[in-house]
Image (spheres, rainbow, N blue to C red):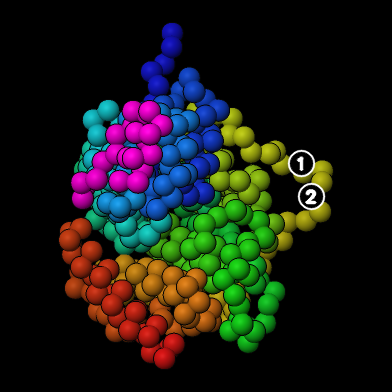
Amino acid sequence: MSVPKQRVTVLGSTGSVGANTLDVMARHPERYEVFALSAATKVDELLAQCARFTPRFAVMASAPHAQQLADKLAQSGLATRVLTAPDALETIASHDEVDAVMAAIVGAAGLGPCLAAARAGKRLLLANKEALVVGGELFMRTVREGGATLLPIDSEHSAIFQSLPEDPSTWARRIDKIILTASGGPFRTRAPDTLSAVTPEQACAHPNWVMGRKISVDSATMMNKALEVIEARHLFGVTPEQIEVVIHPQSVVHSMVQFADASVIAQLGTPDMRVPIAVGLAWPERIESGAGRLDFRRMSALTFEAPDAALFPGLDLAWQALRAVSGTTAVLNAANEVAVQAFLDRRLRFDHIHAVNMETLEAVTPSKPTSLADLLALDETARRAANATVLRLTA
């Protein structure tokens, strides 16, 4: 008896996670069908994906890019329909015919479609950590009320998810501590006083993972781990004090859970995003991901060390933001997005990213946002403050 195909919307399909999602799906054409794709500005890449996967809908972030895509689709004789309405992303995330949504849009822009998918009760594969960092309890409440199935795609959170019992109601009494591993990025052994000279090219040259530019910079500052601490707090219902970060340069142990009896369960694998993507697509089943296998006979060592606070000052902001008033994590996320973009644009020194984040947190006091509109307004306020700091630091 054949099983109906899962129809999947991939938000952010031209990015690293999106492209890897399509790679995994292509290995299982009998199981998965692409329903819709979205991208920001990469018209030709999305056109090629439409030609290969023939989605019903495609969405671009701006009207000019959408028109370019529509023209090229028409010239190619492809039937994919380009949606341009302001709520187009929400439409393809919540469509009645969609079974699963890969949420791989980077940044706060992904929050709206994530909430739409959650409200519609979809199987939501969450690679957009900002949905939880910005949305927090609002997002988790929407998941519960919508009856959505939330599956984390970040390698660390997928590892934790895989290490926990399948019944979430047992987690609170069993978990002692969550241990997030971090590679340490490209500057793990660098002297802190040399960071002012770091270039975008150096920051984006991750030693283990192939990622987009923004998350690569976050890995270099370890702000990605700060955001993951916030995400883990909401995903797994633990307190900030129950989350620990350790540096693990080999990126083989993707994260661990220490239980009440002091035992530790970890998930291991090659540093390939297709593994957590395959887990999210097929859970609780397992399917071929295309990733290489670990060969323990060839491993010389697995090492762990504490993060250097002088080298990674932004890491502690996660716990500070979680202990502060509701909405502070949204401010931190907005500030970091502004600072990282300014660095990538060569307008801000690498070591000033932390200064922008700190000054924005001091300048903006949230007033307990309770809706998407509140969160977006807070995000905009924080971005204005962060941009002001960038201008001052670069004057």
Is 241 above or below relative to 112? Answer: below
- Label 1, residues with CA under 10 Å away: few <14, some 14-19, many ≥20: few
One can see residue 371 in this view: yes
**Residue at x 57% of width, y 71% of height:** 200
* Relative vertical location of residue 8 with respect to residue 141 in this rendering, above or below: above
Q: Quadrant of residue 123?
A: top left
Residue type at numbered disc 1: Asp
Q: Residues within 10 Å of mark 2 (few under 14, many from 20)?
A: few
Does the stretch in magenta take in 79? yes
In the rendered structure, the answer to whether residue 22 lies left or right of residue 72 reads right
Q: Give the residue type that dot 2 points to.
A: Met
The residue pinned by badge 2 equals 299
Q: Nearer the viewer, residue 332 or 232?
A: 332
Q: Is residue 60 magenta?
A: no
Q: Which residue is mark 1?
A: 295
Q: Position of residue 254 (x, y in %)?
A: 59, 52
- CA gap between label 2 and label 1 equals 7 Å
Residue 151 visible in image: no
In this orientation, which residue lies closer to the viewer: 269 or 355? 355
**Front in this rendered view, residue 178 or 309:** 309
Is 179 left or right of 171, judged from the image as shown? right
Q: Secondary structure at mark 1?
A: loop
Q: Choose top left, top right, bottom left or bottom right for residue 379.
A: bottom left
Residue farthest along the front direction in this orientation: 75
Q: Position of residue 338 (x, y in %)?
A: 39, 72
Tell whether label 1 touches label 2 (CB within 8 Å).
yes
Count of marks overlaid on the render: 2
The quarter of the image holding the C terminus is: bottom left
The magenta span reads 67-87
Please report the residue visible at 63 percent of the width from the left and 87 percent of the height from the top: 193
Q: Is residue 32 above or below residue 9?
A: above
Q: Quadrant of the N terminus?
A: top left
